[in-house]
Image (spheres, grey):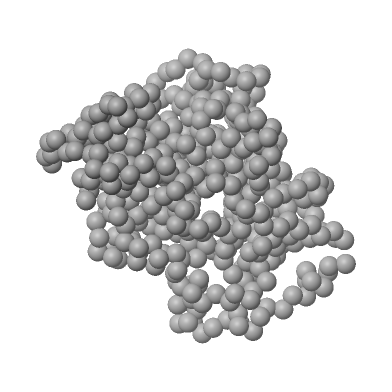
Amino acid sequence: MEDTLVYNYQRPSSLVKKDASEELFLSKYSEIQKNTDAPCFFWGNVSQPFILARCLITLSNIVKSSFNLSPFQMALLKDPIVTAGNSRLRFEGFSHCAGVYARVDVLPDGLDGEFLENGTTNVDFNQPMITALGSIRPNEKIILSVGDKEVGLYREEQKIVERKVPLPVKWIKGLSTVQIYLSQSEKLHTFNKIQTQQLFRGIPKGPVKSDYYLIIRGNKPMFSPVKSANAVCIGGLNRLRLLEPLLPYIDQMQVFPHADMQSTTWQLYMGHIRFSFSLSRESWRGFSGEGAVLDSLIDDISDEWIDALDKYAYANQSFNPTAFALDEKISLKKTDNLAGRLAAMGLLGYDLDDNGFFYRRLPFKLNRIIGLNPRMKNAEKLIAEGKVQILNKSLARTEARVEGTGVHHTVIIDDSKERCTCEWFSKYQGERGPCKHVLAVKKIVQM
């Protein structure tokens, strides 16, 4: 029986509360002063275990779903990323095709425990954990632990522990893009429980091949195949059915479309728990290939800034680019690029309700980020091989010629848009990030 381990744990003497001035210092620089011998990041009770269990089962179902991958490819991907810190827990995951992103946030009032340290891990929820979550009863007391190498669930005589697993590369790329899209999204609708349930009953049966639109008709939300003014465009509408098991428990739902409709985010509120659900533009398009972070990787950002944030910030701490710009006396443009660069490196997530980024370090090496973005790598190769020629340059407009395979591409960048004569740009018109030729020209101009 694990009761002694669960209920009689003694806090290490090194974590005894300091005086007020030292505690204030540690709150800012907690990662420097952290005790590496602490057994876990968080240990304690959850105030809504039944709801959390349903959310984690839904998250697991999302991770197990795919809308464009084979069964073999699906078997290669794993389960949630878990972050503990700043008095909250976050569980993140992707569908196998990386076109659906979901996050469960357990807010401070939903936890009764101790944050011994701050950090992030990545575990695989296997069938014993799913079975245990599915059998949790309303008002049942459970203990949850989150550590560097495992996540544990303790209830009555039962102990389920899931171990750390490698983070899939597709997830690393998708996570960085999602955070950029979330930061460019605005709340448009708020629906109560009844409105939400009525809306979901209007989802067509089976796969949906064409775009649908969320519209309001007589104060009633509905999905329509016909576009109208102020409608929210949704590709792969049937993917929303993954949320149906949670609808009986919600208080309300809010909808956050991306400014250019490259994604839609549906946020469910259940007491002290939030469930965020983001859909890529179309079901066959994963977030991992959208290229939203590429512009942020053009500028050379001071390694000192990145190292400082990574060294001093703690998990789930808010990151405000404007405040950072004022503190460091740098331009807002540079801090916007810094936020994008940090998100691309897995150091920032985005909270729609807080309208800001939060720090969390994904469990992978930061120096891999350029290798995960082949377009940027190929752009740097074009520059190194001298294949980029600037023809005309002014404050408002740049024209360049970039050597390709048996052809020269023309790149034009002005205040309103950027264009290239390559096949990639012709196909996507910039919707999936800049092509390598545009990236190369923009990087030279910055240099």
Closer to us: 74 or 93: 74
Q: Is residue 332 above or below residue 76?
A: below
Q: How many marks?
A: 0
Closer to us: 417 or 102: 417
Residue 348 makes an appearance in the image: no
Closer to us: 370 or 317: 370
Q: Is residue 170 above or below residue 65?
A: below
Quadrant of the rendered image containing residue 162: bottom right
Q: In the picture provided, is 238 more to the left or to the right than 45?
A: left
Q: In the picture provided, is 64 more to the left or to the right than 376?
A: right
What residue lies at 68% left-to-right and 43% top-to-bottom? 60
Residue 110 makes an appearance in the image: yes
Place of residue 35 in the rendered image (x, y in percent of width and height, measured from the top left): 58, 76
Q: In the picture provided, is 446 more to the left or to the right than 32?
A: left
Which quadrant: the N terminus?
bottom right
Place of residue 252 in the rendered image (x, y in percent of width and height, measured from the top left): 59, 39
What residue lies at 83% left-to-right and 67% top-to-bottom? 2
Quadrant of the rendered image containing residue 249: top right
What residue lies at 38% left-to-right and 52% top-to-bottom? 341
Place of residue 176 in the rendered image (x, y in percent of width and height, measured from the top left): 47, 47
Closer to us: 294 or 436: 436
What residue lies at 21% left-to-right and 33% top-to-bottom? 401
Place of residue 76 in the rendered image (x, y in percent of width and height, measured from the top left): 66, 42
